[in-house]
Image (cartoon, rainbow, N blue to C red):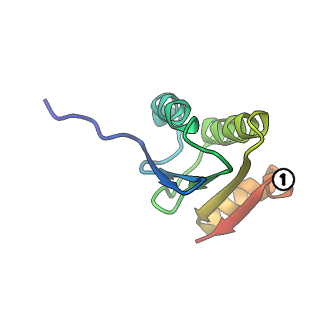
Amino acid sequence: MTATPDPIQAILDGKVLRLVALVPLVASNVAAQRTVLKEHLEQAEQAVVLDLGQSDLVDSLGITLVVGLYKSCLERKLTFSVAGANAEVLRLFKFFSLDEIFEIREK
């Protein structure tokens, strides 16, 4: 049996935690992603960057995951941003006005 790779890779760079989504943020992946995110969030000291450069798709549950991560960062007084969003994901985030709540950088 082949081991399933983590859906999120955590990279700690000083006080900034970069969370790289390795699979799309969609319903079939969100539960596993949420678990991994919670495990890694404790490492962050100042900021969290969700890197979507390797994930080209986000659905409604993925949006919920991102908003939940943002709220967890707020509770811990961490800054939060999204990096590497493709044009389609950026358009979706703007539709929900998420670009008015936290920084979103396009690919």
Coordinates of residue 4 in the picture (x, y in percent): 27, 36
Residue nearest the viewer, comparing 53 with 59: 53
**What amino acid does circle 1 point to?**
Ser
Coordinates of residue 50 in the picture (x, y in percent): 59, 52
Coordinates of residue 92 in the picture (x, y in percent): 71, 55
- Quadrant containing the N terminus is top left
Callout 1: 10 Å neighbours few (<14), some, many (20+)? few
Q: Is residue 14 above or below residue 34?
A: below
Residue occupying image coordinates x 71% and y 34%: 72
Q: Residue furthest bottom?
A: 107
Residue nearest the viewer, comparing 76 with 99: 76
The answer to whether 100 appears left or right of 30 in the picture is right
Residue occupying image coordinates x 58% and y 71%: 107
The answer to whether 31 appears left or right of 94 in the picture is left
Residue nearest the viewer, comparing 100 with 93: 100
Q: Residue furthest left?
A: 1
Q: Is residue 27 above or below residue 94?
A: above
Q: Secondary structure at mark 1?
A: loop
Coordinates of residue 86 in the picture (x, y in percent): 59, 66
List the residue tagged with mark 1.
Answer: 97
Residue occupying image coordinates x 75% and y 36%: 71
Residue nearest the viewer, comparing 18 with 65: 18
Q: Is residue 6 above or below residue 101?
A: above
- Number of labels in the image equals 1
